[in-house]
Amino acid sequence: MASSSTNSPCAACKFLRRKCQPECVFAPYFPPDQPQKFANVHKVFGASNVTKLLNELHPSQREDAVNSLAYEADMRLRDPVYGCVGVISLLQHQLRQLQIDLSCAKSELSKYQSLGILAATHQSLGINLLAGAADGTATAAVRDHYHHHQFFPREQMFGGLDVPAGNNYDGGILAIGQITQFQQPRAAAGEDGRRTVDPS
Amino acid sequence: MSNYTNSPCAACKFLRRKCTSDCVFAPYFPPEEPTKFANVHRIFGASNVSKILQEVAPHQREDAVNSLAYEAEARLKDPVYGCVGAISVLQRQVLRLQRELEETNADLMRYASCLGGETTSAYGGRRG
């Protein structure tokens, strides 16, 4: 007597309204409890293209591939113009800003370090070189510098963009980072995006 | 009679169809860039690209096509991660620089405290 075959069809076969075969290429990566994942991927890439992509990969790579496709599809649906290219553009912009901020901070630090060495030298000789800074002028300057060069708050950033190993995709929260609050300014994504984004 | 010899766009050449005057692809897939459409077609499919273009405003379509072309090319170069790999790398770089900036700022605060003598709340109150 045949065993009871009551396994639920995968999300792909449910969406496509077809019988989910044991060898279904989608089944390992589109569980039935994550219908939105396949719906998004189907809308942006198409089932046929996804099948071809998966068939070209080693089975050990397919889960990562599906999750990255799901991420791209989700981003494209949120932002039909730039998709995740907007994300790349913004990250590049943030990186440039951080590099500038860090350069300024290190430059300031080197000045204070020099001053500190000089003061230590003079102190040992009984000379108070920092009398002029005791009024808080230097303190205010450093404080102002710190606030001006504040880094981007974490809330505006992705959290952990490593492609997840497990099937923990949730249609409401991206497995690859959380970007529900993500804003993509057109200036950064348009002008700079076209000039600086380089797939190579 | 006018000489109607406009070259079909790259999309219609690829799809082997007549390129009509209202072809949605023609403005963005010139015939001299055949690879652009070939890549986009391979990853997204002509039908999906057409739907995406129709959903965005006309002045945004060029950007949309270029970003699709970028994603398609990235996916062909890296079939597993596509452009998500680049995002992951950039994110790690940003986090690294953030940590470095935090450490440098912390050092600056220490110097500020030393220079200010008893000043211990140099960064309180004034925010942003």
Image (cartoon, coloured by chain):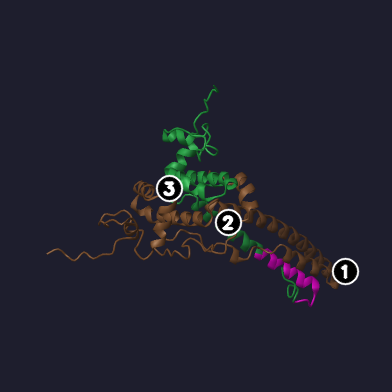
Mark 2 surroundings: few (<14), some (14-19) or many (≥20) residues within 10 A: some
Q: Is residue A134 left or right of residue A91?
A: right
Q: Residue furthest front?
A: B1
Q: Amino acid at mark 2?
A: Gln
Observer-nearest residue: B66 or A197? B66
B117 in magenta: yes
Residue A90's image quarter?
bottom right
Instruction: Tell which chain the image draws in brown.
Output: A
Q: What's the chain of the residue with tag 2?
A: B
- Please tell me whether mark 3 sits on a helix, a strand or a loop: loop
Q: CA distance from mark 2 to mark 3?
A: 23 Å
Q: CA distance from mark 1 to mark 3?
A: 62 Å
Highlighted range, magenta: B102-120
Q: Amino acid at mark 1?
A: Gly
Residue A45 image position (x, y, % from top left)? 42, 50
Dot label at residue B93: 2
Above or below: residue B66 compared with residue A112 = above
A101 in magenta: no
Q: What is the tally of numbered marks visible in this picture?
A: 3
Residue A17 image position (x, y, % from top left)? 31, 57
- Please tell me whether mark 1 sits on a helix, a strand or a loop: helix
Mark 1 surroundings: few (<14), some (14-19) or many (≥20) residues within 10 A: few
Q: Which residue is mark 1?
A: A132
Contact? badges 2 and 1 (CB < 8 Å) = no
